[in-house]
Amino acid sequence: MSFKLSEKLDESDESLKVAGTMLYWGEGYKSVHAKNVDFANSDVAMIKVFLSFLRKICNINESKLRIYLYCYNNQNPKELLRFWSKATAIPLSKFTKPYIRKDFKKEKINKMKNGLIHVRYYDKKLLLQLLDWIEEFKQKFGRIQ
């Protein structure tokens, strides 16, 4: 089984479900034509919360998880891979070849100091579940008054 949604959520778990869904709504790739969950960000805490959501609420199968690093050519990709591996508790073997952007400009020196990662989970059904939860929130709270 690729994932198994937690059924009985306490207040903390329910908050994590809402947080994970909202994070994906804001920072995830939401095409129904996609084949996987793809959440991208450079904020370590945000990445950790989203991974917590996947692990605790969705009970994912870690073997379907991949991480894709995006960084600039003035950064050390090997160092960034180690940083993100430690921060996410995901082994380096789950990281794909990084994308290194060649057009670094000095005014961007502090932008994305740890690069940006895509947390990718290869399961279309989980993507559709996330999109359903997002739709529920839109219906419940998205009406303009």
Image: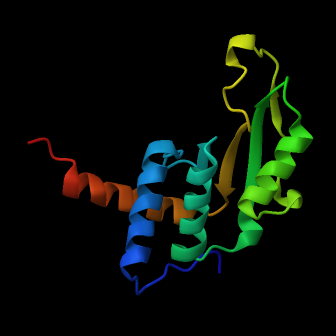
Residue at (66% x, 26% y) in the render: 111
Q: Where is residue 110 shown, x and y percent of the image?
A: 69, 25
Q: Where is residue 8 shown, x and y percent of the image?
A: 40, 87
Residue pushed farthest left?
A: 145
Res 97 quadrant in image: top right
Residue pushed farthest front?
A: 110
Report the quarter where the N terminus lies: bottom right
Q: Where is residue 17 shown, x and y percent of the image?
A: 43, 67
Q: Is residue 107 above or below residue 74?
A: above
Res 115 quadrant in image: top right
Report the quarter where the C terminus lies: top left
- Report whether 95 appears left or right of 25: right
Q: Where is residue 93 shown, x and y percent of the image?
A: 89, 59
- Report whether 1 appears left or right of 77: left
Residue at (47% x, 60% y) in the render: 20
Q: Is residue 48 above or below residue 25?
A: below
Q: Specify how the rendered protein is coloured.
A: rainbow
Nearer to us in this view, 99 or 19: 19
Nearer to us in this view, 59 or 106: 106
Residue at (39% x, 63% y) in the render: 18
Residue at (51% x, 74% y) in the render: 57
How many marks on residues?
0
